Image (spheres, helix red, strand yellow):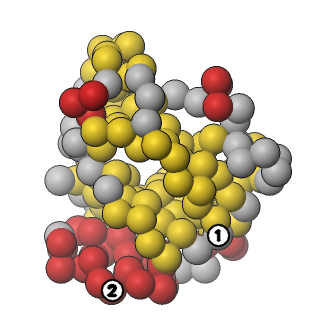
Amino acid sequence: MIVDQLDNAALYKSVNSRLAKAFDYLKNTDILSLEVGKYPIEGTDVFAVVSEYQAKKLEDAKWEAHKDYADVQFIAAGEEKMGYAPLATMEVKDAYNAEKDIIILKGSGDYVTATAGTFIVFFPQDAHQPCVSTGKNDKVKKVVVKVRV
């Protein structure tokens, strides 16, 4: 897991060339003007999913993980808490869905508050619980760049 501000993204470009493309996209795109939807960056290897929503109560948010993709979750507007735990500490709630590249988990972890300008990279070994309300009921605009690993 990596947590930082988009202004510092260049520090992480050497981790993976596809991750570098994700950061370039986030830095060079007017995210706030994008409509909700899916945007190709590099075919199915790197693509962005833009969403807008009300953050959820903690008890309504789901723990998840992915096998084929890392998530670069970037908060463009609003704020939310995101949970993190090592995948090995979680229990499987719903079996892995290969078509959606997601496994739903149960367990507990630690939380980070992500405000506008923050990105968090969750790798396949990172269970995460996004979309959790900070109690402010802010509407969130987020881009998740999916990066094949």
Residue located at (18% from left, 72% from top): 15
- Left or right: residue 41 versus residue 29 is left
Compared with residue 134, is residue 105 higher up or lower down, i.e. above or below? above
Residue ID for mark 1: 116
User: Can residue 50 be seen in the rendering of this structure?
Assistant: no
Q: Does residue 147 appear left or right of residue 58 in this picture?
A: left
Q: Position of residue 63 (x, y in %)?
A: 45, 30
Q: Residue 13, image x and y in percent?
A: 25, 79
The picture quadrant where one finds residue 104 is top left
Name the image quarter holding residue 107: top left
Q: Would you say residue 78 is visible in this rendering?
A: yes
Measuring from the top left, give residue 60's x and y in whole percent: 64, 25
Which of these two is toward me, 12 or 38? 12
At 64% from the left and 31% from the top, the residue drawn is: 58
Badge 1 element: loop
Q: Residues within 10 Å of mark 1 (few under 14, many from 20)?
A: some
Q: Which residue is mark 2?
A: 10
Task: State the CA–CA distance, disc 1 to disc 2.
Answer: 18 Å
Label at residue 99: none
Amino acid type, label 1: Ala
61 left or right, relative to 73: right
Task: Please determine whether, in this image, residue 14 is positioned above or below residue 108.
Answer: below
Residue 37 rendering spot, x and y as whole percentages: 57, 52
Residue located 52% across and 28% down the image = 62
Amino acid residing under circle 2: Ala
Q: Residues within 10 Å of mark 2 (few under 14, many from 20)?
A: few
Q: Nearer the viewer, residue 73 or 80?
A: 80
Where 59 falls versus 147 (above or below)?
Answer: above
